[in-house]
Image (cartoon, grey):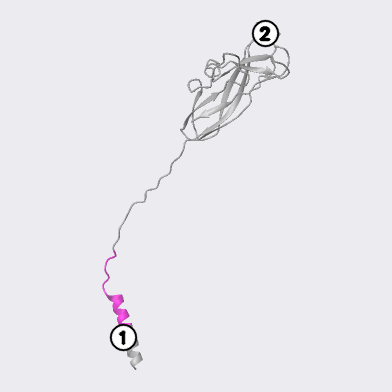
Amino acid sequence: MKAIRSALAAATAAAALFTAPSADAATATANLTVTATVASACTINSGTLNFGNYDPVVVNSAGGIDLLGTGTLTVQCTLLGTAVVTLGQGTHAATGSTDAVPNRRMRNTNSDDYLAYDLYQDLARLVVWGNTAGTGLPYIGTGLSTPVIVYGTVTRGQVVPSGTYNDTVVATITF
């Protein structure tokens, strides 16, 4: 009987706990600051500008026309990131060539003969593309990979021997 009374007393005490008025729970709050930094970033990929055939006797002679060509670089920068794309003087730049006013030349692969050419930022070929911030192409990033066209001209009237001419120009993006 004593065991029944103890069990009954325990049950009554437990019931009293559940029916007793409860106290409100206390709370406190704090802010969690969340941050991230998006760094300005750019990439540049090379391309090719192939002028094709230069005819110093008829088509591209002194009385003829300049040989025109275009090439494409691929650039990608962070959305709204600013950059400048510059083009070096080339491996075979002429004496007196500077980064601001490059005198670019292609070299004959079989001799020491050269074929002069110019690179421009615009289709009208009025803005020479150099290797300084002031002579480079300003670029604003779209976040996507975009083509950047390089316009080239081999001036008419150059008297050169036949052969294959080439040059290498370093393209740089500064951001």
Please state which of residues 98 and 70 is positioned toward the viewer in this rendering: 98
Q: Is residue 13 magenta?
A: yes
Query: Does 21 appear above or below 44?
Result: below
Q: What's the amino acid at mark 2?
A: Ser
Pointer 1 residue = 9
Residue at image mark 2:
61
Q: Residues within 10 Å of mark 2 (few under 14, many from 20)?
A: some
On screen, residue 39 versus residue 8, left or right, reads right
Residue at image location 57% in from the left, 24% down from the top: 149
Instruction: Label 2, secondary structure: give it.
Output: loop
Q: Residue 69: where, in percent of width, then height?
A: 63, 19
Instruction: Give how far across and how far down residue 129 sits, in percent.
Output: 54, 20
Q: CA distance from mark 1 to mark 2?
A: 119 Å
Number of numbered discs visible in the structure rendering: 2
Look at 33% across and 83% down and name the residue there: 11
Q: Which residues are magenta?
A: 11-25
Quarter assignment of residue 153: top right
User: Can you say whether 74 is above or below 34 in the image?
Assistant: above
What secondary structure do most residues of the magenta stretch adopt? Answer: helix
Q: Amino acid at mark 1?
A: Ala
Q: Nearer the viewer, residue 34 or 22?
A: 34
In this picture, residue 38 sits left or right of residue 113: left
Which badge, 1 or 2, is on the more N-terminal residue?
A: 1
Q: Residue 150's x, y, as percent?
A: 58, 22
The secondary element bearing badge 1 is classed as helix
